[in-house]
Structures are given as C-alpha cells and as structure tokens.
Image (tube, grey):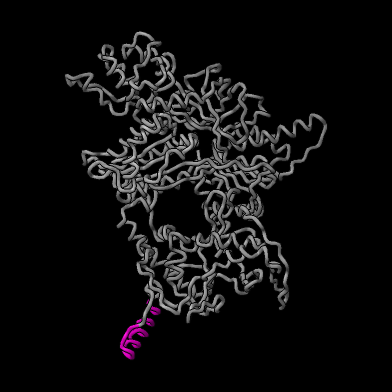
Amino acid sequence: MIQYQQEDGSILGDPSNVELTQDIIELGWVPPEPRSRWDLLPIVAMAENDAPAWADVPAELRDLVDIRHPRFENFQKLGLKWYQFPALSRLGFDIGGVQYTAAPFIGWYMDAEIGVRNLADSFRYNTLPDVAKALGFDIENYKKNPEYAEIEAMEDLPDYEQLVWMSRAQAELNYAVRWSFLQKGVSCIGTLAASSDWTRFDDEHASKYGYRLNSDPYWIAPPQGSIVPVWHRGGAPNYQPKPLIARHRLDPVKSWRRRRSVVKTPVTRLVKVGEDWVTEHITPVQNSLCIENGTKNLTNGVPTIPKKKVHIYYSSTGTSALKLTEKLRRRVKELPGGFQVDFNILNLLDLRKIKPSDPLLMVVSTTGDGRFPANGAEFEAAMKDRVMEYNGALAVKYSIFGVGDSAYPTFNAASVKLHEFMKAVGGIPIANGLTKGNTAVEALPMKAFNRWWSFVKDSLTGEGANEVATESTEDECFEHHRMLAGFNTGRLLSKSPSETGEGRIVMITMDLGDMDYIEMSHLRLLPYNTSEQVTRTLAALGVSSASQCVPFRDTTMPSLSYGEFFQHYVDLEGRFKDLAWLPEAFPAGDRWDTNGTVLEVLERLPGLQQITDDLRMKVCLDMPLLRPRSFSVASSAKYVGKGLVEIMVRLHKGGRFSDKFLSAIAPGDSIKYTPVTIVPGQDLISSQKHLIAICTGTGFAPVRSLLQQKIRVLMEAESQGMDFVFQSPPISIFVGFKAHDEALFEETLAVAERYGLIDMLFRVPSNKQKRRVQHYVEDNKESVLAKIRDGSIYVCGAKAMVNDMAAKLSDMIGGDVRQSLGRRYVEEIF
C-alpha cells in the first residue's frame, strides 16, 4: 500500500512505506487524484547495470476487499480495505548461499497478517482504537467515573482497561477480515488452520526423523500478541534458518542512486494499450518533492514560512511521564501553523543548542528518594557545573510539568530542582514555569496536565482556554509582565446591537491605530479592572497610595505599583485559588464568607486593612491573573478603514470578557490587544481554487472578513468604471445563526451576493426542526464533492459542530476528510 507524508507530518496510508513511496515518485510516477489511504504503488523492477522500469498494477488486479463485519454495522463506516494477494517488496529468496533477488512468490494471505498486523499495528494503519469504538467503546462512559473524568482517549486508561478493548478489537477485526475475504470469494487461510497445518507437519517430521524443524518463531507463531509492545522486540541471537525470504543484501534504491550517473539507459514506464504493453521513457525527478496533496513548497509564488521549533524532553520512572510527554508531542504537532518537535530523554538535553526563540517543555517524574529517574540522572549530575558555566546568561524559555506522588515526602522533588536550576542559569519561565501533577489523586494526572497544557498552548500560539484561573506566583507575574509588553492599546468605538442578552452576538468596532491585520486572522484582547474596582481593592487591603510599589521578593521583577497590579495583572472578578493565607490573617479562627469574587471577599474582611506587607503579598499572589481571549477578525481593513477592526463576540452571562468587561467599558475607552501570528486560513485568502465555507455563530467572522476584502476590490473597480473578474471561483457558504442575530450576517451576505461572490448560499437560522448546517451540506453532497476535487473546505464553529461536520464529510468522501484533503481542509474551533 502507498503512503503519503503530508507537510504537517501526518500520514495518509501505510506509514511503513514512507521512503518507498517517495523513492517511486522520484522515478516519475505520479500518484492518483484524489489520493486515498488505499492507493497501490506501481511494480518496479531493475536489472543489474540497467535503469528501473515500472508499471501500474493492471485494473483487473487492483480490486480491493472491503472489510466489513456481519454483526457490527459501524464497521463499514471505518472504510477499511485490503488487497487480495500478498506482495513482497525488496525481498529475495536466500538458499545455498545465493540470494535470488527476483524470485517469484505465490501464496495467499493468512487472516492475521491483515487483521492483526497490517491494519492493527500502531506503526502501520493503527485501526484498533477506531475498531473498538465501532464495537461500543465510549470514552464518555468512563468519564462518568470521577477517577477518569479528565481522560481524553483510550490510551489514558489503566493498562488492564486498554487491553480488554484492544484484545476484543483485534479479535473482531481479524474475524471481519476472514469473513470479508470469504464473501468476496478470495482465498485466505485462518490462523487456527494455518497453525494446525504447521504443528501437524512438524510432528510428522519429528516422528520420522527424530528431531523437529529449525524455525524462526516470528514467522510461525500467531501474531495476536503484537498489541503488547514487547512482542516486537525479538531476542538475541536473531536466529534465521535458511532457506528463507530475506531483505536484499544491497538495497536496490541505494544501488540505483549510486549508479544512475553512469547508467545510460533511461527509466522506463510500461503502459498497457489494449492487449499489448508499450514502453515510455521517463525523466526521473532529481530532488525529493513535497508530496502533500499536490501542494508544492510555494503558495502563490510565496515561500512557506519555516516551522517554529519546540523542544520536548522527559525523564520517567514508569509510564505516566512518558505517556504525558507523548501526548504533549502530539498536541504540539497538531497546533495550527505546524511546529517542528525535537523529542528526547532529559539526559540528551544540551541547553547550548536551544535557541532563545525555541520553547523548551519538560515532563519529569521523581523517584521514591527524590532524585531524577535514570534517563535524567546524568543531566541532574551536571547541574552544578552548568550553573557556574552559564552564570545566569542562558535566556531559554521553558516550562515544566512534574509527575509525583504526594504520599512521598519527596513529592515532585525532581521537577522543583529542575525549575530552580533553570532559573539559576537564566531561563525564562513560561506557562507558569512549573506545574505539579499528583499521581496520588489520579493514576494519570490529566487534570493538572490539561491545565498546564492550556497555558503552554497559549504561550505557543496565543489561542486556547485562556480564562483558566490558577494560583499566581511571582514567576507568573513576571511572565504576565512579559506578555503585556507585547500588547498594544486600542480604543473601543462602538458596540451593537444595544439590546443585549444571553447568547446574543455583539459586534464591537475598535481603532487599532497604526496596526494592520490580514483577513481571517485573530486578535487577543485583554480585559482589565475598572478604576473604581482598583480603588476599592486598595482600600480593602490598606494600601494608602496607588503608586506604592508591590514588594516582590524577586529582584529581577520590574518595579510595579499596586494601582497597575490591580488594574492589569490580577482578576478582581475571579476567585481566590485556595485562601491558604486566611489562618495567618485571622489566627483566632473567625469564620468568614469566602464565596464570591476576589473583591467581594476582600471587602468582607475588614481586618486586612492592618496586615503586614508580607501577608498582603500572599493575598495578592493568591489572586488569579487576567487572561486574554482570542477572537477572529470579522472585517477587512480595506473595507471598514485603515486601523479599524470589527469583532463578533457572543455574550455569555458572567463571562469575564463578553459580559463583565464589555458592560463596564464605553466608546472611547481603551482595550489592550495583540495580533496572533498564526493564521490557519491564510492560504485560503489568495487561493485560486474553489472554497466551501461552513460556519455557525461567531464562526462566520473569518468568512465575513474574506468577503469584505473581495467586495472592496470589486467596489474600487466599479467606481473606476472597470470590470474585474477574480481568478478564483465564487465561494459556497453554509452558515448557521440564531434568528435574533440575523442582521449581523445579512448585511455582508447580501452585498456579496449582489457582486456575484457567492455561488451557493444556505442561511440556516435556528429552527424547531433542528435542521443544522451539517444537514444542508449532506443534502448537497454531489455539488460539494464536485467542488472539493481540487478545492478547499473551511469549517469554523463550536467543537461539537466542527467534529460532526468532519464526520459527515468523511462519510461523504469515503475516508477521513482531514487526512484526504490535508491542508485543503481548515477547521477552527471557538
């Protein structure tokens, strides 16, 4: 089977054939369009001192077997297939000291080769998690148990829970393979039958000759144990009895590359014309191409931006830290814009090779005696020397997640030591610097890990769950100070409509000054506390002057007044983290009502007006920090005016930004903002291919900005009496909204329709029939499929809608839409 490696590193097809697919593309073979997980590579042969010749597998031999299950209907939705006959690539027959590199191989499959290995192995098609879901595995049922409330996937469960589902999935997949081959009338031997044949033959040989046959157990043992990692390890010595089918002594691809400069014959393609085979000379591709859905390394003539690099290192005693680190790696690689990930054990971390612009993320567990595990012990041993060597001058951005057990007095000692070391060498903490996970509370500390990840994601991209309230530390304040340095100050011009209510969308217009932005981009907006709230907080804590400096212990922290701290750093509308300072403030044990916002609690505690600076500092650091929120721009500066931006905000009762902050400010007031550098839909702006936009609610904002940009171009041409025709076709739009928000959508849609910018528009207001945009997309399946043959899809909305839309589109195209379309499928979740 073929394998396409896409630009983001994801795989479409069989991961074991990464190099083989690329090698054959370099011989001039062109993959079919559209591409799928089940495309077949051509047959390539090469004689000594000759150039390769290749031919596509004839159509009559290309028929695949659809893998279905007679008892589970959901199996068919997985879209699994396999080809009918075994094919060996780059393998020869070794006998009598001679390797025959093109010996014929005749046989048929054993069910386990396909169902247990090819489709199931985690490094092949890795279908067992999806098969388990088809059999009834539902992560939501596990999450009802408080112990598993934070898990996200089967891999987060304890190993005994995973094994029962993986074993069942493996058995049923193997059954489905055998059943499907029988239904197709294709030969396929069963595992038990093949094993019985071998053991009977071996017994007969032993009875006749007095000894059993030499054999390689990995060739004759049923591979059902392959879901357990150690099965793949083999053992020493690696016994390979002859004769056997073995890898070529000389790799044919490497041989060709070494000799192609002296081989005079051209690469040949064989094409079947009628009953005859005709040869064509092919010019090989000299350099590797980017085989990502037909996309070159240029977008409209503009070179792609190199990926940012993130370093991830771990030190683990068991599986918890390793699982979390692998989860971290996947999450970073899945972030929009793409990140290059450097992944390894802590012993191999060389801080001198980390650039200041590249974040360093570390997951570290602690041994029972408070030390680093073995794969981090060498790094620990070198810490003292490294502190002297770097002398506080190593400005590396870092964050640590510690995995420890609070039952031990050395709880998270290794991660704390690493945190102190990084600060000593000059490291700059990001994402809280250090977050401690506790395996005494959760076997896999997902709750703490997810909280840490929300800040890591925010630091890397400026997006994610930005309103998580966590304990403030001086490190966090320092990080917040650095974050504020990247914010600009804009001005609110208007809010509409004037009638507000739960769930309504408000359009705010801001003046950004000289800052420019592109369509479909995002801005991070940071709320702040009002002057009246700051004055009340100063009084509640007995601070005589707003200009009085906050007494941070960290001398590297810039001088900061209490007025600035209470207005732009801490969230007075949030809640205290743990109120651990209360017993110190009120040793008599007085009971106070601590249910409410920071400001409400402070004003209930009059005794705080006479506290020491040290205690006041503890109170301040127990306040949650203000967190920015990311919003898509809903306008084009070319349309609304230079420096102006419109943003769609859905009102949520009690929401820190959408409700409390927006209701507290008026036109003319300032708003802090910063642009988000990563724009997932950037390639769509200048694309000359068809675009289908599917959006709901405020997810319409990016589409609105794109339409405004196109409208402006046509308006300028119209004003000059010119005709202008876009090279890209009109946009197809499916948009859902609540009836009371319709005016915000209709204004731009109506103008775009008048200018012919939309060829297919489905307005889907909320309705009693519960008809959603997804249903209208399904109703127009033929049109949608025709447009995305070489076009793109943009989906933006709530998580449930985006995932449901991906599932429905996958059903429509007969494969995973995200993998099949690659960068031509863009989705954003708000």
Residue 712 appears at what percent x and percent y?
A: 71, 32
Characterize the magenta stretch by its predominant secondary structure: helix
Residue 478, compared with residue 536, is above or below; it is below
* Residue 397 located within the stretch drawn in magenta: no
Residue 112, compared with residue 744, is above or below; it is below
Q: As drawn, is 336 to the left or to the right of 565?
A: right
Q: Residue furthest top?
A: 544
Give the camera-side residue of 664 and 632: 632
Residue extent of the magenta highlight: 191-212
Q: Residue furthest bottom?
A: 208
Q: As drawn, is 736 to the left or to the right of 115?
A: right
Camera sees residue 145: no
The quadrant holding residue 782 is: bottom right
The quadrant holding residue 451 is: top left
Q: As drawn, is 140 to the left or to the right of 50?
A: left
Residue 179 appears at what percent x and percent y?
A: 45, 73
Q: Quadrant of the N terminus?
A: bottom right
Q: How many marks?
A: 0
Residue at position x 26%, y 45% in the image? 367
Residue 31 appears at what percent x and percent y?
A: 63, 61
Residue at position x 44%, y 38% in the image? 352
Residue 606 appears at what percent x and percent y?
A: 27, 13
Q: As drawn, is 71 to the left or to the right of 792?
A: left
Give the camera-side residue of 387 and 514: 387
Residue 766, compared with residue 41, is above or below; it is above
Q: Residue furthest right?
A: 721
Residue at position x 34%, y 57% in the image? 162
Camera sees residue 771: yes
Give the camera-side residue of 100 and 433: 100
Residue at position x 68%, y 67% in the image? 263
